[in-house]
Amino acid sequence: MATQLGNFRLEHFRVGLRAVRFWVGEEAMQFRALAAFTAMFCWVLAAALCFAPGVLAGLFAVDFSYPVGLVMRRAGAIFVGLGLMFWLAREAGPSAARTGLSAGFAAACGLLAASGAYEYLTGHAGAGILAAAAVEVALAAALATTRV
């Protein structure tokens, strides 16, 4: 029986993964290690967003203000939760929930990378945002190619 996510079937995601695995190689990173890494990454990013938002704004060459700090601190809280979800799911066996977690965060990372590139190209952010976009692309690719 096929697992359904709205009109999107789990098999469609798996067929897409086969094409990506052909490009990067069949041996994909194991979910447990990737989930642990992703959790740690989220927590480090959350700490930076919550306790040093001005440093991140400076890296992206964005003027820091109270409203910018407010949004960054709130985003930090989201990354705490995402990290906790990945940490708790790291021991989970293959399932629709694990696939959803990986696919959802891969999509979010891809969109973050695209928006970072857009902000750089339009002059709203400095070159530091491209480093963040590169990490986001790498994390999205790792999540999309791990065995789910």
Image: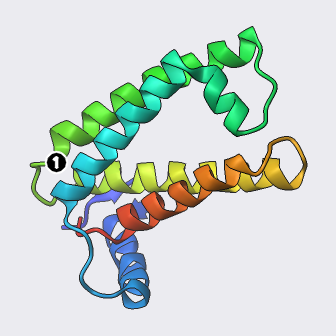
Q: Where residue 79 appears, x then y in whole percent? A: 42, 31
Q: Quadrant of residue 146?
A: bottom left
Give the residue displayed 17% in from the left and 37% down from the top. 88
Give the residue displayed 76% in from the left and 51% down from the top. 127
Question: Quick one: quadrant of the C terminus?
Answer: bottom left
Identify the element where label 1 is drawn: loop
The three-letter amino acid code for the residue at tag 1 is Arg
Return the residue nearer the eye: 21 or 47.
47
Question: In the image, 40: left or right of 66?
Answer: left
Q: How many marks?
A: 1
Question: In the image, 12: left or right of 147?
Answer: right
Give the residue displayed 39% in from the left and 73% down from the top. 12
Reply above or below: 115 against 55. below
Give the residue displayed 44% in from the left and 27% down from the top. 46
Provide the residue designation for mark 1. Answer: 90
Question: Quick one: quadrant of the N terminus?
Answer: bottom left
Return the residue nearer the eye: 15 or 140.
140
Q: Residues within 10 Å of mark 1 (few under 14, many from 20)?
A: many
The outermost residue toward the top is 66
Q: In this orientation, does residue 28 appear?
A: yes
